[in-house]
Structure formats: C-alpha cells, structure tokens
Amino acid sequence: MCGIIAITGKNTSALTDEKVLSMLSTLSRRGPDDKGFERFTDTVIGQTRLSIVDIEHGHQPMRDNTHPYSIVFNGEIYGYKDLKLDLEKRGHVFSTQSDTEVILKAYAEYGEGCLKYIDGMFAFAIWDENKNQLFIARDRFGKKPLYYTQIDDTFYFASEIKALFATEFIKGEIDPSAIDEYLRFGYIPPYRTVYKNIQTILPAQAGVIENGLLRTWQYWRLEKKERTVNHDEAKTEVKRLFDEAVKKRMVADVEIGSLLSGGVDSTIVTLYAQKYSSFPIKTFSVGYDGHKNELPYASEASKKIGTDHNTLAVNANLADELSEIVDYMDEPHGDSSDFPQHLISKLASEKVKVALTGDGADEIFMGYGWYQKKWHMPRWRLDWRFLNPFQAQQKAITVFKTRERKKILKIFSNKKNINETEITSKIKNPIEKINTFDLSFYLPGQLLSKIDRTSMMHSLETRSPFLDTELVEYVYNLPIKFKISKTENKILLKEILAEVFPREFVYRRKQGFGAPVDLWLKNERIKKLTSSLFLENNPAFKYINYSEALKIYGRFYANKRNTANKLWILTCLLLWFEKHQDINS
C-alpha cells in the first residue's frame, strides 16, 4: 500500500523539489518504507511506499524496461502472477517480481484497455512519454482513493487531499452542499469532496490528461444479468469463488493477518485464510466493556480455526483518540465505528503489515437488517401509500431530515442528487435498488473510506476478499431468496460457515462494529471536548446555525430521545472544522 502524487501541466516547473517532497511527506503513513519522485517535461510523479511485494526491487516511480512509460501505483493487484505469465507469452520481459511492473506491461500490451485485465484495489498514474499524456485509474469499488484539482491548465493528483494542500498554493473552498449531504448521511458521498475546488476520481473510472484537458470514462459497471441456478449450485459456486478470492489475497512477501470480530464475515474470511498459511495466522479483535462485546466470540472462532489471537478491550482516552482520527481525516466522517477501526488497525500494525477483513459481505449478501425489514414490508402499510421500500430505506438512513437541515444549515440547496438517482434509475425492484445503492454509494462513501484512512494512518494494508470482482458479480445476480428470507439474512454465507461452526455461533443476532455513542457523549472527557467545540467562534458556524446546533446539544444532555447520533455527527463535524481550519479558505 502506498501514497501517490502526479502533477501535469505547464505550471509544473513552479513546483519545486521541496514542494514535491512536502507533498510526499504528508503521505508518509501510507508508505513509510520508501519514497521517490521523478520529473518529466511538464510532469512530476511521486510515491511513498509500504513494501509488501518484491520488497527489494519494487521502488517507485518505476520505469518500464522497454517502453517510455513510468508509473506510480497505490494498492495491490490480485492474480498478477497469472497475468504476468500471459504477458510473458506475448513477448514481454520483466525486470522485477512486483505487481507494479505487471501494470506497466499490461499498459504496453493493451493501452487504456489494460484495465479489463487488472483486478485488485488500486489507484495509479502512468506517464506515457510517447503520447505525452498521463493515464490515471481507480479500482472498481473505490477501495483506494485518488483526488485532484486543477489550477489553470495544470492538474494535481494525490492519494489524500492533505498532499494537495502541501503545495501551499491550494486552499480548500468548502462546499455548503457537501455539508448538507454530510448531515443527511453522516459522510461525504463518494462522487464529491467537501471542497468545491477538489474532485475525486470515481470508482471504476479512468482518465487521460492531454493538452490541458481531462477526459474520463467508466471502464466497468456492476450490471444485472439474469442467472438461472438452483440453491445448491449457487452455494457451490460461492464457495469456489470465495476460496479463490481469499487465496489471491494471501500472496505477499510479508506476514498477513486477519481482523477477527467473531462475526460471520470475519470468521469465514479467517477460516479460509488459515488454509493458505503454514503457521497460525495472527488475528486481532477489539471490544467494548459492557457493550456489544464480541471478544468472547472472536476468541471462540480463533480457537476453532487455530490462530494466534490478539485482543484489546477499549479503555482508551476517547477524546484524545477521536481528535487523532479526525485530525488525520481529510473530510468530515461521522461513523462511530471509526474509533474501533482505528484501534484494531493500530493493534494489528504492531504485528503485521497486511490484514484481511470481512468488509463487503453485508453489501453483497444483503446482511443489513433493512433488507429484511423493507423486503417484507406489507403493501397495506402506510409506507407503501407514499413510499416504496427503497424510498422508505432512504428515509430511515437519513440522520438529519430535510426539515431539520433547512433549519440548521445557513445555505440549503435542496437539489436532487443526480449521482444518487443515476445509481438506481435502471433498476425496478426496490430491494435491488437498496442493494445497488449500498454497493455504489454507501460502500465507497462510508465504509471503504473509513477502512482506508483508519488503516493507512497506522501503515496497515487491508484486503477484502468479499470485494473480489468475480464474486461480487456472481452474488449480485443471484436470486434474492438465496440471500434473505423473513427470518434470516446472508443465507448462503451462513450455510457455508455452519458446515464448520456450531449453529448457535453462526445464527446468533448480528452486533456489528458500532459504538455506544450515547454513553461516550456522557464520558467526562468527551463532554469537555464537546463543550469546547460548541462555541460560536468555531469555523463550522459559517455554514451551520449556531442556535440550532446548540438546541441539539442541549436536548441530548437533557436526556431527550433520538438525539445521540445527531449530536455525534455534529461533534465530529465541529471537531473536523477546528482541526482543519488552517487549510480552508
């Protein structure tokens, strides 16, 4: 895992070597092992490296040994050895054992069409001296980030927004409509940033910068395809695809561990991962004393699988840890599970460089409670008179309702979200709409951004077998009845795990990775932090009505119901503005 930068345009010469190094230094946690940059005519590319594959020869930027192409690359390519063999048969000669060089040779063979053959988590930039153009791309699900801004005809790309600000001539211009969406969802949607003048390359998007212009296209889409298959056939194929997905992610020149919560998703990942290790893999768990404590289940799973288990009970200084997380985050993010994800990443990074996770299982196997609730919503229910299940689910996941945002925001746009509409416009089944929304909106916007930042702040690479392209495409097109029923969710996945684990372990009630926000907000240190943020001089109150925010603060501490999540979302926003006010114009 790494951090990358790429700058191309006529003003690149104004970017001194010192500025380039400053940009790279902001990405040092993403890549603490090595760094480098290279200049070309009107172009600079650079990288900080977390060495995972071909540690000795994988330095970047990497030049092709035959063609005038150079690359900086963040991520991992799965199945790269098979692709390398195919490229060798086509006459390509390799100088390293790295997956980075495989991308270069794939580009040499297929040009912009190389993305058809590359699977993994990635963001990369290739400078093509023949065409005098920069070719950029991001992985299919948005696991690895890539941001950019344009000043005149010069483009600046980076793995994190903070690297763009390190130039010192780029300042963030807060987008009030992004703050609106943050209050609605609790995170910034995946197709935009919190800044007007900074954009993001979208999941499954590629682009070319040539003659001062950026041309982008979507190279892959998750599409509905009719699949005729019975239950047993589907189960067998899911097992095969999942086994292959885990196997591909167990390739590295360093030790690989697993984040083991004791839930279905992380347990089955760990179970399959152990098959491909000659020694007990290291597993990691965190738990809350007296609240949703799954440490006993994680311990049970570890013993049955035979792992080297490491645990942590959460008793840290909440205020200090929250400040550290928000300080690292380039954008507001109000998910309470940021905190335990940060702690488990910190714990794992002390033992391994790479860890597998169960992320993506709930999205592809419909593991969230809202699938069952909305699928079995009777048509005579009031919701059906005004809302179909998809609309009802959208209403349910909204933190601040429209009327509340009208009151609390100084600027309320009330614009229909075009990207959000496009995601589900071609799908008629409301449950499939929810599923597509989760995969295309919630997954990259909330979940994957959280995983990437909280792991990278500790220089830990995380890999998600459930987000294997073939597996996702297959499961996405299975009949809904193979995923949920009136009484159960993730049907196929649980059946597979139940072949090894006791039913009472597999079919217990889902707990998730959330946090006791209402209790946290009453913690003395958090109360002190919160009271220091709800002051009128906080820069957030340029966009938020102070009096309305203060009402929410007061209602919670007056023990009013249904206010904890709203106060947490606001607290994270106010803390983010305080931590980042120096870079916002």
Image (cartoon, rainbow, N blue to C red):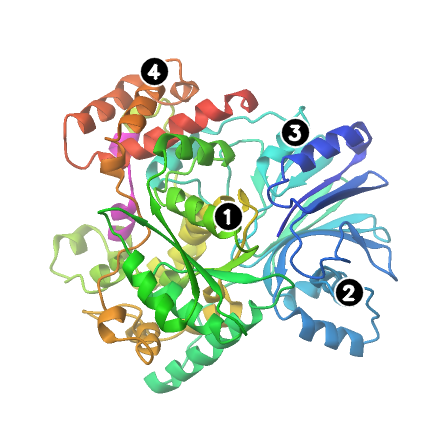
- 118 is within the stretch colored magenta: no
Which secondary structure type mostly characterizes the magenta part of the structure?
helix
> What SS does tag 4 mark?
loop
Q: Secondary structure at mark 3?
A: loop
Which residue has dot 3 on it?
166
Is the Cβ of the residue at disc 2 closer than 8 Å to that at disc 4? no
Q: Nearer the viewer, mark 1 or mark 4?
A: 1
Q: Please say whether residue 399 is one of the residues in the magenta stretch.
A: yes
Q: Which residues are magenta?
A: 392-405
Task: Classify residue 46 by image quadrant.
Answer: top right
Precedes in sequence: disc 3 or disc 1 = 3
Q: Earlier in the sequence, mark 3 or mark 2?
A: 2
**Mark 2 or 4, closer to the camera:** 4
Which residue carries the number 4 mark?
Answer: 535
Q: Residues within 10 Å of mark 4 (few under 14, many from 20)?
A: some
N-terminal label among 1 and 4 = 1
- 279 and 539: which one is in front? 279
At label 2, counting other C-alpha atoms closer than 10 Å, the crowd grade (few under 14, some 14-19, many 20 or more) is many
Mark 2, residue position: 105
Identify the residue at horizontal 58%, vertical 31% (top origin): 197
Give the label on residue 455, or none.
Answer: 1
Q: Earlier in the sequence, mark 2 or mark 1?
A: 2
